[in-house]
Image (cartoon, rainbow, N blue to C red):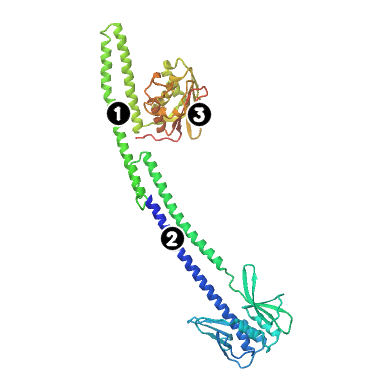
Amino acid sequence: MRAEMWRLYRHLIFGGIVIVACCYAILEFTQIRFGVSREEQLLDVDAEISSALLLSGISQSLPESQFNWTIQSKDNPSISTIAFLIAGKKWLKLPNDSYQITFGKPDAPVLTGRTESGDSLFKIDSLLRLFLLSNEISYADKIRLIESMPCISSEPTSIKSEVPLTNVSLVRGRDTEYGFIWKDEETQKVIFLSISNNDTTSLGLIAVVVVGVGITIMLMLIWRELISLDFKRKTFESITRQIARGRSGLPKGIPDSSGTLKELAYSFDSMSSHIQRLLKVQREMINAISHELRTPIARLRFGLEVMKDEVDDDVAKTIEALEGDVEELNTLVDEVLTYGKLEAGSLALNFKELSISQLVGDILQHNHLLLQHLSVETNIDETDLVLADEHHLSRALQNLILNAAKYAAGKIVISFSHDEERWQLDIEDDGPGIAFEDRDKVFIPFQRLDNSRTRASGGYGLGLAIVQRIAFWHGGAVLIDASESGGAKFSLIWSRNQHQNSLS
């Protein structure tokens, strides 16, 4: 896992460096582009004012302009024609980063200007002063020409001015606009002239967008790594659950580039295989011992039976007691062998329809001597049918009924219910009950509870363990709850969809 975390940190570090570098490059490119756009805008202003000066005859040469001008026509056009030519000017950027602008038809231009590549020193103030303070054209013509210039905006202002033209900086909120206050001698109107800002895109907005895109890419990289880690975690959990259910061997293609999860999964698999081998050896040993005990038990039974005919009555009573002990030992061997088969899963179950009422009735009739001191109440409809293995279900129900008989004070209640998915048989007694924290312990083989349900009441601690395994092979379980009469309530539940006939 450390390798996975280091890879995540490495991706974050390198990804962060790349994203920061890309953001810097984009912002630097944007800033350069803004500078170029601003330079082109100032060239446009220069060209418009210079064309108005040259075409109207106010000036014959303009050293203040960035352009080298060539006039094709010797006659000065009218003001309306000049306004039309200014509005229809055409730009051309040359390969050496210089610019060319033409006024008029491309094949027969009236005025042509061309810049030299290199640093630009703009003298917009001087050009505008020459144009606005000239006496060659009227105030109305000046206003008409200014209105035809797309790069210059004009608006009346209430600011008082004592001089014809003044440089000013107009602050509007967070923005500062540089321009000129113009008051012509022919009128008392004051006009504010400024360079129009054609580029409405904010550099701050671009910076925010670039940083936001960078953060989004970073989050996507982090999310991708986290998804990969979560997928590996789920795969590892699935493998451990399969191992816990007894699967041996690992699936192919475990997604783990560093090998950490794969190594841990193989360790779990090795441990699981070792535990399975130990359990197999233990089961084989218990089964072998149980089988081998049958022979000496049979010899003891035969020998005790022979001795009864050769001894007096007092010794015969002792022999009968010994026969009871031998029978108890034989029962224990049978239960150990039964539980071993159920635990190993080497069973051949034969599912068929059974009358649960008849099955419970046969168990009660067969064990009437053990139940004669109790009141047994059954709540089962005679028409109720179930699907189960008759032998093993009968064994499970008998164990539950006899277990209730051991601890009941005077009454046992047997109830049956069902729905669309399962069958349920409840067996309740009015005995001392089972504490909540001890309910899982009763299913452990040979487990004894430190209360009234002790070894003094008989049994070997295998009966309920056998019931649990039978319920498991029927696709169900055994639940313990408190009875309404104060004792214990065992609920045997099994699935209505469990139809397989072999579990070997």
Dividing the image into 4 quarters, which one contains the C terminus? top left
- Which residue is found at the position 29% from the left and 28% from the top? 287
**Tag 3–tag 2 contact (CB < 8 Å):** no
* In the image, farthest residue toward the front: 162
Q: Secondary structure at mark 2?
A: helix
Q: Label 3 vs label 1: CA separation?
A: 38 Å
User: Toward the viewer: 135 or 222?
Assistant: 135
Amino acid residing under circle 2 = Gly
Q: Is tag 3's residue or tag 2's residue first in the polypeptide sequence?
A: 2
Q: Which residue is mark 1?
A: 286
x then y, percent, for residue 59: 62, 90
Q: Is tag 1's residue or tag 2's residue first in the polypeptide sequence?
A: 2
Q: Residues within 10 Å of mark 3 (few under 14, many from 20)?
A: some
The numbered disc on residue 89 is: none
* In the image, farthest residue toward the bottom: 74
x then y, percent, for residue 240: 38, 42
| Residue 383 can be seen, yes or no | no
Q: Which residue is mark 2?
A: 15
Picture quarter containing residue 466?
Answer: top left
Q: Is tag 3's residue or tag 1's residue first in the polypeptide sequence?
A: 1
Decide if residue 158 is on the left or right side of residue 494. right
Comparing marks 1 and 2, which lies closer to the viewer? 2
**Tag 3–tag 1 contact (CB < 8 Å):** no
User: Toward the viewer: 305 or 227?
Assistant: 227
The numbered disc on residue 417 is: 3
